[in-house]
Amino acid sequence: MEQIDGALGIKIADMLATLGDVGLTYQTPGDGFLNLGQVFAVSIKDEVAFKKYFNTLCQKLEGFTNNGLKIKRRIYHGVELREFGTGEGDVVHPTFAVCDGWLVLGLYPQSVQGFVLRSKGKLPAWKPDARTAKTLAAIPEKPAAIQYTDPRPTVKLVLSAAQPFASNYADKFFKGYQFDTSVLPNPEEACQHLFPNVVWIHNDGKMMRWETRESLALPFELVGIEAILTLYFADTFRSVVKRSAN
């Protein structure tokens, strides 16, 4: 860690110490295709100190010219966005920003821009419907995690895509089988009785308790790419801090 700190010009543990203890991850269809619109955010306890460390870190990383890393800086509604890339056909363009007490990361600038727009009141922020608000109000104090997912957009997407797929490709996958597309339910009708899912987890140090209020639990809600990345980064940060302390 001393060698890493020396190369970067900062103490990583000190920079991490400026962060808070609240993490947030979300995605909205308007910010990116499928999971590519995922946003990760961590609360910041000392924004001034974090910006100082982060500026030094970016300068050092950009100075390592042998890796071809380039950082583009843009001011977006008063917030500085930093887009990382090599300029050689990058598949993703990781973008960071410090916005109103949060360190924000997205795979593309547009998802971070969405966070900034909602934080500044330029776009409406997410608000729970009456049923979800009632569920959230019933959650006991100090949960370890809360997850909100709405299965309706996914159900509508799958059923809408299933119509042309079944008509054109079902017989190719299942020889001699003629699929009657009329048996597929209308997407809007299929979602009439669905409502958003809310999951919360409690951890008292001895036992973890998982409670749900769900209308339709879709596969990989908690084990998708966003959850894997969140756990990976959380574990990485924890390991770095632990090694620094030792």
Image (cartoon, helix red, strand yellow):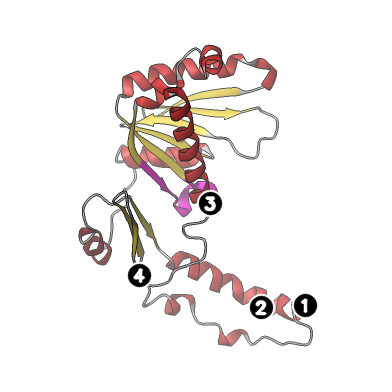
In the picture provided, is 91 more to the left or to the right than 44?
Answer: right
Q: Amino acid at mark 4?
A: Phe
Mark 4 = which residue? 195
Q: Residue at x 40, y 39 (%)?
A: 41
Label ID, residue 166:
2
Over which residues does the magenta segment extend? 23-38
Separation of marks 2 and 1 at Cα, in angstroms: 10 Å
Q: Verify CB contact (< 8 Å) between mark 1 and mark 4.
A: no
Q: Is residue 114 magenta?
A: no
Q: Nearer the viewer, residue 59 or 240?
A: 240
Q: Is residue 32 visible?
A: no
Q: How many marks on residues?
A: 4
Q: Verify CB contact (< 8 Å) between mark 4 and mark 2.
A: no
Which comes sooner in the sequence, label 1 or label 3?
Answer: 3
Which comes sooner in the sequence, label 2 or label 3?
Answer: 3
Q: Residue at x 42, y 18 (%)?
A: 53
Which comes sooner in the sequence, label 3 or label 4?
Answer: 3
Mark 3 closeness class: few <14, some 14–19, many ≥20 residues within 10 Å: some
Separation of marks 3 and 4 at Cα, in angstroms: 21 Å
**At which x and y percent is residue 123?**
34, 45
Label ID, residue 13:
none
Mark 1 = which residue? 172
